[in-house]
């Protein structure tokens, strides 16, 4: 093998390896990227931050303010994006309530409500 043929071989191998890597990366991650997520517009509206005024974690999830089981729809004002903890441990764990509208929710904190938070306004309830 001549020197230039050697180089051509390396280049071809490297190119196809990079193509393989890119293809694998794409196939693996595209389904989890925001662009293919049905709720992308809601996460974007909420700036990819937990909608709790006292949290702001980035691992957002989708919550139906009026539960789907109670007839809540997929309308944007019925949707909000709390982080996984506020969503599952908080709202669905009974530690807080998220009140409508989803685009600008009021949060009631505490199993027995102790504080209502709407944007920067905090009201003690207990
Ligand atoms: Zn939920
Ligand atoms: Zn949160």
Image: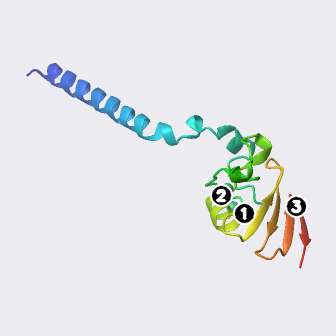
Circles 2 and 1 in contact, beta carbons < 8 Å: yes
Distance from Cα at disc 3 to Cα at disc 2: 19 Å
Return the x and y of residue 23 as percentages of the image width and height: 37, 32
Q: Of the residues under marks 3 and 2, which one precedes in the sequence? A: 2
Q: Of the residues under marks 2 and 1, which one precedes in the sequence? A: 1
Mark 2 highlights which residue?
A: 83
Mark 3 highlights which residue?
A: 120
- Position above or below: 8 against 102: above
Circles 3 and 2 in contact, beta carbons < 8 Å: no
Residue at 46% of width from left, 40% of height from top?
29
Relative depth, front residue between 44 and 71: 71
Mark 1 highlights which residue?
A: 55
Left or right of 15, for residue 40: right
Other-residue count near label 1 (Cα within 10 Å), few / some / many at <14 / 14–19 / ≥20: few
Relative depth, front residue between 55 and 40: 40
Can residue 60 be seen at all in this image of the molecule? yes
């Amino acid at each position: 093998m001549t020197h230039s043929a050697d180089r051509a071989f390396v280049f071809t191998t490297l190119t196809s390896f990079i193509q393989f890597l890119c293809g694998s990366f794409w196939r693996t991650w595209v389904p989890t990227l925001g662009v293919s997520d049905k709720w992308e517009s809601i996460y974007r509206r909420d700036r990819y931050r937990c909608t709790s005024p006292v949290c702001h974690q980035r691992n957002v999830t989708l919550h139906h303010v009026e539960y789907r089981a109670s007839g809540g729809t997929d309308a944007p004002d019925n949707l909000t994006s709390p982080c996984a903890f506020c969503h599952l441990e908080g709202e669905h764990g009974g530690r807080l309530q998220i009140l409508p509208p989803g685009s600008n929710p009021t949060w009631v904190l505490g199993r027995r409500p102790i504080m209502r938070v709407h944007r920067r306004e905090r009201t003690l309830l207990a």
